[in-house]
Image: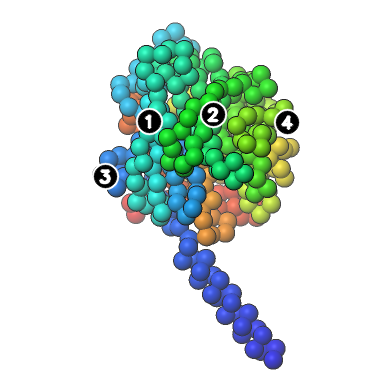
Amino acid sequence: MKTLFFSILALNLFLYKTAVDAQAVQAPVITGEKVKDTDGNFINAHGAGVLYHNKTYYLFGEIKKGKTWLVPGQSWEDYRVPAGGISCYSSKDFKQWKYEGVALAAVKGQPSHDLDTSKVIERPKVIYNSATKKFVMWMHIDANDYSYSQAGVAVSNNPAGPYTYLKSVRPNGQMSRDMTVFKNDDGKAYLIYSSEDNNTMHVCLLSEDYLAPTTKYERILVGRRREAPGMFKNEGKYYLITSGCTGWSPNAATYAVANSPLGPWKEQGNPCVGPDANTTFQSQSTFVLPLEGKKNAFLFMADRWNKQNLEDSRYSWLPMQVVNGKVFIPWKNNKS
Ligand code: GLA
């Protein structure tokens, strides 16, 4: 009887594992390259985020098109292209990407509009609100000297859009530049952004409809000057990968760990391992995607910016794992 019980248990475990493996996505390894869509065009989705909905991945990113120019009178390398709006691509397998069109269009000739081509529209991130059945996009909205420092929000009934732009805000009166959103498994969502002139990050709980910041927020990584945040959860712990603040030039990533999205957060070291680990493999973080159907398997998504020709910027997508509470992003050369 006991033997039969254990045989059935073993068979169930085997079937479960086979089912999980069959669903599992084998994300491609992209090492500072361009990626083509199914029309053969290069994917134009920088500072990207991914939404997984109804067995489909939706990739959103900044459209970078046109001649790169340097904003005059800045003390740093403020290279820009006209704000191009937000693109969307969809995929079932993370390999074949179908262009879904412009999810949020920029506007022309309205300099006071948040989405005017003279502005900054960066780092779009989309989450789904199952109560309102709306897709909510948050993004960084700025003036081209980065003095505006606001978080913009747009909404749609369809994952790929088009999205209706609502407004931009300074959450609780605080500056908001590089940002991400994180939807927890209890349905609560958080906006995470570089604040206080990039000196300190904030994590702010969003309202139940995800359309506004609440007054509940925490200052984290105080005085550490971090940006480009990507948050994820693994085995009950929360992780936040960030870059330092060196404009479009790459620097070393670090990660932080917490027991709750609001912290307290404890900064750890650099998760990258291998050549160019001290420049995040010449890239800057933008998003961490949990791989569906796999346990403890993530895709670290980053931008390899070409600051003097931003349209020519590339992507680094690398597998990432947590081992005994430590995050590892090993370099992988997909040419070998
Ligand atoms: C950093 C940010 C980017 C962008 C550039 C502008 O790299 O992470 O999103 O704002 O600065 O220089």
Reply above or below: 2 against 231: below
Q: Are marks 4 and 1 in contact (CB under 8 Å)?
A: no
Instruction: Decide which of tag 3 and tag 4 comes sooner along the chain.
Output: 3
Instruction: Decide which of tag 4 and tag 1 comes sooner along the chain.
Output: 1
**Alpha-carbon distance for marks 3 and 1?**
17 Å
Image quadrant holding the C terminus, namely bottom left
**Alpha-carbon distance for marks 1 and 2?**
17 Å
Residue 89: x, y in percent? 38, 42
The answer to whether the residue bearing label 4 lies less than 8 angstroms from the nearest atom of ligand 1 is no
Amino acid type, label 1: Ile
Amino acid type, label 4: Lys
10 Å neighbourhood of mark 1: few (<14), some, or many (≥20)?
many
User: Nearer the viewer's eye, disc 1 or disc 2?
Assistant: 2
Describe residue 203's horizontal placement relative to residue 289 as left or right: right
As drawn, the label of residue 153 is: 2
10 Å neighbourhood of mark 2: few (<14), some, or many (≥20)?
many
Amino acid type, label 3: Asp
10 Å neighbourhood of mark 4: few (<14), some, or many (≥20)?
some
> Which of 250 and 101 lies nearest the eye of the viewer?
101
Element type at marker 3? Answer: loop
Q: Are marks 1 and 2 in contact (CB under 8 Å)?
A: no
Reply above or below: 184 against 224: below
Q: Quadrant of residue 178?
A: top right
Element type at marker 4? Answer: strand
Q: Which residue is mark 4?
A: 216
Describe residue 21's horizontal placement relative to residue 130 as left or right: left
The answer to whether the residue bearing label 1 lies less than 8 angstroms from the nearest atom of ligand 1 is no
Which residue is rendered at x = 46% and y = 25% of the image?
121
